[in-house]
Image: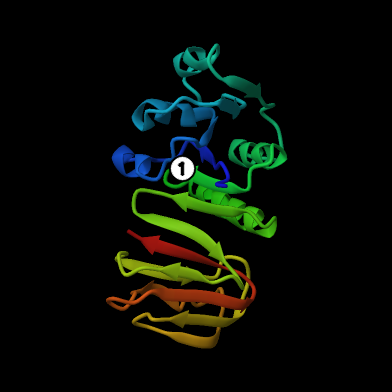
Amino acid sequence: MSVKRCVVVAAGEIGNYERARAFLHEDDFFIFCDGGLSHAGGLGIKPDVVVGDFDSCDANDLECWMQKSEIIQLPCEKDDTDTLFAVKLAVERGYCDFLLLGAMGGRFDHALGNISILLYLNGLGKKAALIDDYSVMQIVGKDPLYMEDTSSYFSVLTVAGDVSGVNIKNAKYPLENARLTCDFQLGISNEVLPGKVAEVSVASGRVLVVIVC
């Protein structure tokens, strides 16, 4: 039996709505975060829940969904970003599969914070991906990630400290039991070999894999 997925839509940039819609499922549960409501029309979806302190949300957008969606208003001064609150809410409600949209572009601090949300969900044993206009991003540790040769490039980045036992197979630049450090990003712009399925795994630590597609 398939498990329903929670899609969290933040207030970052979505320049290609057609591309974003291609990743959506009919039975997804949608949480929109504050200014992320501006993406509802472009994505062509109805928010199930809207969360935020509404400091960046257009008042007309919010009023449009007041009677159609669950609204959770947050204080302006809080530890969690609106996006992290939305993710924690979905975890509390039992979701184990996540897709983040509108989580990159604009403010770099928020973008980096949203990468940390992928680490947070991975630490909880949840499945999660972040999609922007160019790529798909996932956290990888001991459980391998497999990639078809349909992607243009992929990068393996250290975002949570140095890692060891890194293996990259069936790629233009393979690695075996390698150590990667945060001060030298060795794993940028690799390629899956034609007709092959690349594999990335890490024995100790976690990496961010960015698949350009």
* Residue positioned 47% across, 58% down in the render: 137
Image height of 70 relative to 23, above or below: above
Label 1 crowd (10 A; few <14 / some 14-19 / many >=20) = many
Quarter of the rendering occupied by the C terminus: bottom left
- The spot of residue 205 in percent (x, y) is 64, 73
Name the kind of residue labelled 1 in the image. Leu
| Residue 3 or residue 163, whichever sits in front | 3
Question: Helix, strand, or loop for circle 1?
Answer: strand
Q: Name the residue under label 1.
A: 101
Quarter of the image for residue 88 reads top right
| Residue 85 or residue 128, whichever sits in front | 128
Image height of 132 relative to 196, above or below: above
Quarter of the image for residue 51 reads top right
Image height of 105 relative to 42, above or below: below
- The spot of residue 173 in percent (x, y) is 38, 83
**In the displayed structure, does residue 93 sit left or right of residue 7?**
right
Q: Give the residue at the far left of this rendering.
A: 194
